[in-house]
């Protein structure tokens, strides 16, 4: 007995929205605010990842973010502070950029399981915790500081802002999704 594998084809509209979300990440990601006590800036990158996964699901949301990373790796100034190149990924904040891949996958899987806003908030928090773990471990290693010092300078001060970003996505995500569906850009 031969099993058939059903493949999902990406529509032109999905491709367009994926490209749009990549472009939005490239526009908002570099806009950052440097803080005097940490090498980690306040950035809107995770906000766009939250929104991308809400609109596209985990697969295309992750693809959108991976394209953004590849553009930055190629040297385009799409990372925080309008920087790019391998040095940014290998530098102290590179672990957070890599951690956002896992953020997209984990929260997207949770999103597929439930449309409840509370469950989706939990998915964003879970994904962000994993991104924090990657980023904090890499920052501690790169900066030769202790794990608790890295948490104190690069995670704890960011938690309130990241929670605000999550709440904003919970509020605007459904409205944007509904409009994109009415326009025929999402199925």
Image: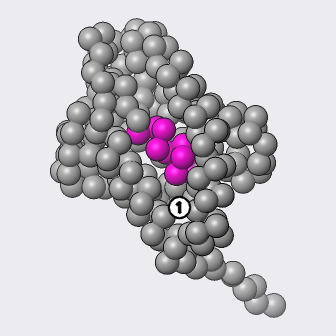
- 76 in the magenta segment: no
Q: On the image, numbered disc 1 is attached to which residue?
A: 60
| Image: magenta residue range | 45-53
Q: Position of residue 11 (x, y in %)?
A: 54, 77
Residue at 37% over, 31% down: 43
Question: Is 102 rendered above or below residue 156?
Answer: below
Can the viewer see residue 106?
Answer: no
Q: Residues within 10 Å of mark 1 (few under 14, many from 20)?
A: many
Residue furthest bottom as drawn: 1
Q: Quarter holding the N terminus?
A: bottom right
Q: Residue at x 46, y 19 (%)?
A: 158
Q: Residue at x 20, y 46 (%)?
A: 77
Q: Along the horizontal axis of the image, is 103 left or right of 152? A: right
Image point 64% across, 38% down: which residue? 171
Specify the principal SS of the magenta part.
Answer: helix
Quadrant location of the C terminus?
bottom right
In this rendering, position of residue 181 left or right of residue 133: right
Q: Is residue 107 left or right of residue 146?
A: right
């Amino acid at each position: 007995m031969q099993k058939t594998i059903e493949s999902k084809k990406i529509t032109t509209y999905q491709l367009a929205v994926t490209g749009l979300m990549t472009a939005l990440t490239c526009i908002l990601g570099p806009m950052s605010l440097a803080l005097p006590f940490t090498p980690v800036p306040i950035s809107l990158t995770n906000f766009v990842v939250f929104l991308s996964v809400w609109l596209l699901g985990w697969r295309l949301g992750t693809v959108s973010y991976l394209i953004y990373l590849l553009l930055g790796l190629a040297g385009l100034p799409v990372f925080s502070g309008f920087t790019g190149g391998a040095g940014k990924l290998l530098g102290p904040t590179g672990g957070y950029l890599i951690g956002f891949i896992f953020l997209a996958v984990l929260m997207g899987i949770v999103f597929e399981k439930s449309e409840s806003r509370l469950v989706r908030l939990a998915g964003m928090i879970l994904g962000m915790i994993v991104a924090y773990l990657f980023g904090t471990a890499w920052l501690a290693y790169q900066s030769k500081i202790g794990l608790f010092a890295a948490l104190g300078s690069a995670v704890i001060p960011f938690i309130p802002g990241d929670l605000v970003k999550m709440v904003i996505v919970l509020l605007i995500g459904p409205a944007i999704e509904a409009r994109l569906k009415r326009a025929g850009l999402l199925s």
